[in-house]
DNA sequence: GCATAGTATGTGGTCAGACCACATAGATCA
DNA sequence: TGATCTATGTGGTCTGACCACATACTATGC
């Protein structure tokens, strides 16, 4: 199970081992790709494949150039990787949108309940600020929804659970496009904004008074309400998920906007490469 | 935001676009790496970096050789990617074990409560079979814990929520080593096995009679009990997570068992490459 | 004619070497 | 002293070349 005989796995597992042992920790910089390749006895391209995985998973940040900022540095930003993973799984219909929404309900109601039980110590400042910012009347739907998403993530952060925070960021991110598309199905955006803001206030209020059940109920209604109102979760949901609010089922989308990948490319016109920046 | 100027991103986003449009779906096969590279105007190595990411994320499965099984095929197996992500984040201390446990509590109590509310229709056969299998007296701790993990995942699967199922598989997988290490701290393994089995039975029974609150409570005690008993979550938990059961804090582990990656490799002995299978 | 062995083809997996763009550090020059 | 200019080293990318593997085709023997 160690090497799996694939070179890039060797690199990945070496780095994981060093992370577990403490020899590598956030803030540290990895050796250069060439040095790493020589050290592990693999090719540089294999090292790069492993680094690419680590980058997407939110474990490494790379910078070009030279100096203290250059190179690959260990970080621990799971939200990005979680978002990427969920977004692609949604795209591949591995994650139906309905399942995403149900999971949001589970996580977010738990978060607000927990915050309510620790009402005095929970740092709600950021959530409050975001709520205030949402009061601006000049916001476009996209801007408002971005603040909305940040508000929900801020609540998770207040609960000081990195796992749930990352999950919520990923969940929200994965269906961002669908949420935005749902705006078009709202009967009246302006009134919806007012309602959403009021619901957010109500959630914060319930947390502040320490009423866990009330916070839980309000968060549930808040999330379920929006998806019901926008009739979201109709696309990509052709599975047997017992439904949240009786989701409708619609046919799929139209084909691609650009020529999709041919499974058997007819010929081999190398096209004009997109401005190759090298010799 | 489209191309990000990095070649492998172009590949990733092209595939994601085709997934969203339906031009690509699970079961389909991607064009060959060389064809894909020519088609997108990037190098083959960039295509490979993108494919590597997709593979780790559980979106493609690659096979060498020729014929209908060869090449890269679209799949949708999020559990693998979730496990990889969480395992590495735990290793990098981005995910403290305590946060993992708290998240398990949230997800699993929600799952059993939901199952209890749909007691008649919930397919508990697999969970029951695993529970029966756990009765075998000849099981090693590792075997027993593997069945235990499968039992919990089976409950999530019964809830028909792919997202939670993947999350739970990832959570459990990420701390597998810690759970196993906890066995050594148990006063009496045999009696613990009996207790765990009894708790599992109790959870299933509560689900079957449709008592959501009871199922929730029993699951909570089951999970929290094991971690309290094994005094797990002591390592890698040096953050400010408000605790679940008053976790102790210990110093870190010892250094690496193998020579860790040097941040500045002193020289450049290319070592003997591990049996390079090429010219 | 038919079964078998041998070969051609195409796949992912890997490596090596070469550039580029970028960013710093040090040397050079006004 | 100050600004500029030149190594030097980084990740990012491309190209071309092999290998191991698995199939599909073809020639060969009966």
Image (spheres, coloured by chain):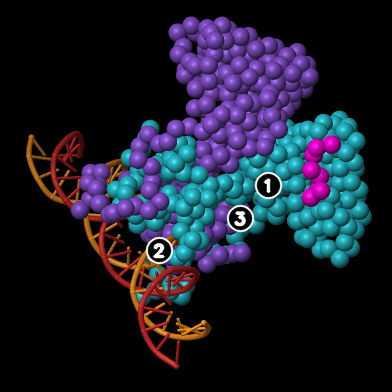
Chain colours: A cyan, B purple, C red, D orange
Decide whether residue A85 is among the magenta residues: no
Q: Tell me the SS state at disc 2.
A: loop
Numbered tag placed on residue A113 in the rendering? none
Q: How far apart are marks 1 and 3 (CA)?
A: 24 Å
Q: How far apart are marks 3 and 2 (CA)?
A: 25 Å
Q: How far apart are marks 1 and 2 (CA)?
A: 33 Å
C8 vs A78, nearest the viewer = A78
Q: Are marks 1 and 2 on the same chain?
A: no
Q: Number of labelled discs?
A: 3
Pointer 2 chain: B
Q: Tell me the SS state at disc 1.
A: helix
Q: Which quadrant: the C terminus of chain A?
A: bottom left
Q: Which quadrant: the N terminus of chain A?
A: top left
Q: Do labels 1 and 3 share a chain?
A: no
Task: Examine the rendering and report whether any part of residue B167 can be seen.
Answer: no
Residue linked to disc 3: B21
Pointer 1 chain: A
Instruction: Please state the extent of the stretch shown in magenta in the rendering.
Output: A120-127
Looking at the image, which residue is at 49% across and 16% down? Answer: B184
> Could you say where residue A153 lies in the image, as x and y percent from the top left?
73, 46
> Could you say where residue B128 lies in the image, as x and y percent from the top left?
60, 15
Q: Tell me the SS state at disc 3.
A: helix
| In-image side of A77 versus A13 (left or right) | right
Corner quadrant of residue B127: top right
Looking at the image, which residue is at 70% across and 21% down? Answer: B220
Marks 3/2 in contact by CB < 8 Å: the verdict is no
| In-image side of B275 versus B130 (left or right) | left
Looking at the image, which residue is at 55% across and 65% down? Answer: B3
Decide whether residue A126 is among the magenta residues: yes
Determine the main secondary structure of the stretch shown in magenta.
loop
Numbered tag placed on residue A169 in the rendering? 1
Residue linked to disc 2: B43
């Amino acid at each position: 199970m160690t090497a799996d005989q694939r070179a890039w796995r060797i690199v990945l597992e070496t780095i994981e081992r060093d992370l577990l042992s403490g020899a590598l920790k956030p803030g540290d910089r990895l050796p250069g790709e060439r040095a790493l390749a020589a050290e592990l006895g693999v090719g540089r391209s294999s090292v790069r494949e492993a680094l690419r995985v680590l980058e997407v998973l939110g474990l490494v940040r790379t910078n070009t150039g030279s100096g203290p900022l250059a190179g690959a540095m260990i970080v621990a930003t799971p939200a990005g990787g979680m978002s990427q993973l969920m977004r692609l799984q949604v795209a591949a219909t591995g994650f139906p949108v309905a399942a995403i929404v149900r999971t949001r309900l589970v996580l977010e109601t738990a978060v607000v309940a927990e915050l309510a039980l620790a009402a005095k110590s929970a740092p709600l400042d950021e959530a409050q600020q975001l709520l205030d910012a949402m009061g601006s009347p000049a916001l476009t739907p996209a801007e408002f929804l971005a603040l909305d998403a940040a508000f929900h993530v801020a609540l998770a952060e207040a609960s000081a659970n990195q796992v749930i925070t990352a999950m919520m960021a990923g969940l929200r991110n994965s269906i961002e496009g669908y949420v935005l598309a749902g705006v078009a199905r709202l009967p009246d955006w302006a009134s919806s904004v007012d309602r959403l803001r009021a619901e957010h206030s109500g959630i914060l209020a319930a947390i502040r008074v320490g009423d866990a059940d009330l916070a839980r109920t309000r968060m549930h209604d808040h999330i379920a309400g929006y998806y019901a109102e926008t009739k979201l979760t109709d696309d990509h949901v052709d599975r047997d998920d017992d439904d949240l609010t009786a989701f409708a089922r619609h046919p799929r989308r139209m084909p691609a906007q650009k020529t999709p990948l041919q499974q058997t490319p007819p010929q081999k016109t190398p096209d004009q490469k997109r401005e190759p920046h090298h010799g």
